[in-house]
Amino acid sequence: EVQLVESGGGLVQPGRSLRLSCAGSGFTFDDFAMHWVRQAPGQGLEWVSGISWNRVFIGYADSVKGRFTISRDNAKNSLYLQMNSLRAEDTAFYYCAKGSTTIRRGFIVNWGQGTLVTVSS
Amino acid sequence: DIQMTQSPSSLSAYVGDRVTITCRASQSIGTYLTWFHQKPGKAPQLLIYAASTLQSGVPSRFSGSGSGTDFTLTISSLQPEDSATYYCQQSDSTPYTFGQGTKLEIK
């Protein structure tokens, strides 16, 4: 069974940084693209970033480009999201998601349960 | 960026009804279109990928169609457990944008 467990969320002041982690299990981690998707409370889904299995292809939403960095450690079956210069509008549940084998024109297959990031002074 | 527009934003229907949700892309995306649904307090779940391919384990009352800019998700016979918010997402080009969601309620 595919399991994706996010960690690292919490309350952070505007302008500060936070690093989210996602531990994957139940599948061959380095065979699949991975994504981060967020959802502000009571709002819709927003794709944040995605990374191919070999880190060659990386993409970001315009709203986070230059502030957030996605990375992965296939040896540790882990996905990360480094979030810098956080803003109030970054407040959301952040979901780790397993993609299909290809990130280009692939799709999201499985989702974690999410971790809440609150940006507030 | 490609904009995804769903309609309606919300709808209410009876058990047994046939329900259709539409998703329109601001430019052609081929068949790189995925449908999810999300129940309150839960993570989204994959229903359909590549516009019309049913994900394993998803009931056959769900179906998808379309290509280019216009897509539909159809539930052939609505069940109580289908009450959820439905989202489309394009993966033709980054950023992989979602529609704004369609909230489906059971009367």
Image (spheres, coloured by chain):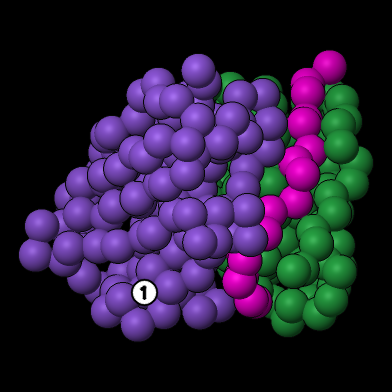
Chain colours: A purple, B green
- Seen in the image, is A86 located left or right of residue A53? right
The answer to whether residue A48 is above or below residue A17 is below
The answer to whether residue A44 is above or below residue B95 is above
Q: Residue at x 78, y 23 (%)?
A: B105
Q: Residue at x 84, y 76 (%)?
A: B27
- Seen in the image, is B67 located left or right of residue A121? right
The answer to whether residue B61 is above or below residue A6 is below
Magenta stretch in the rendered image: B91-107
Q: Position of residue A17 (x, y in %)?
A: 37, 40
Quarter assignment of residue B31: bottom right
Q: Residue B102 colored magenta?
A: yes
Residue reaching furthest left?
A: A75
Quarter assignment of residue B88: bottom right
Q: Secondary structure beneath disc 1? A: loop
The three-letter amino acid code for the residue at tag 1 is: Ser
In the rendered image, which residue does mark 1 sit on? A52
Q: Looking at this view, is A8 or B47 the one in front?
A: A8
Q: Position of residue A12 (x, y in %)?
A: 41, 26
Is residue B100 something one can see in this rendering? yes
Q: Residue at x 84, y 42 (%)?
A: B19
Q: Position of residue A84 (x, y in %)?
A: 42, 47
Q: Looking at this view, is A39 or A109 the one in front?
A: A39
Q: Residue at x 50, y 30 (%)?
A: A14
Q: Residue B11 colored magenta?
A: no
Q: Position of residue B49 (x, y in %)?
A: 58, 65
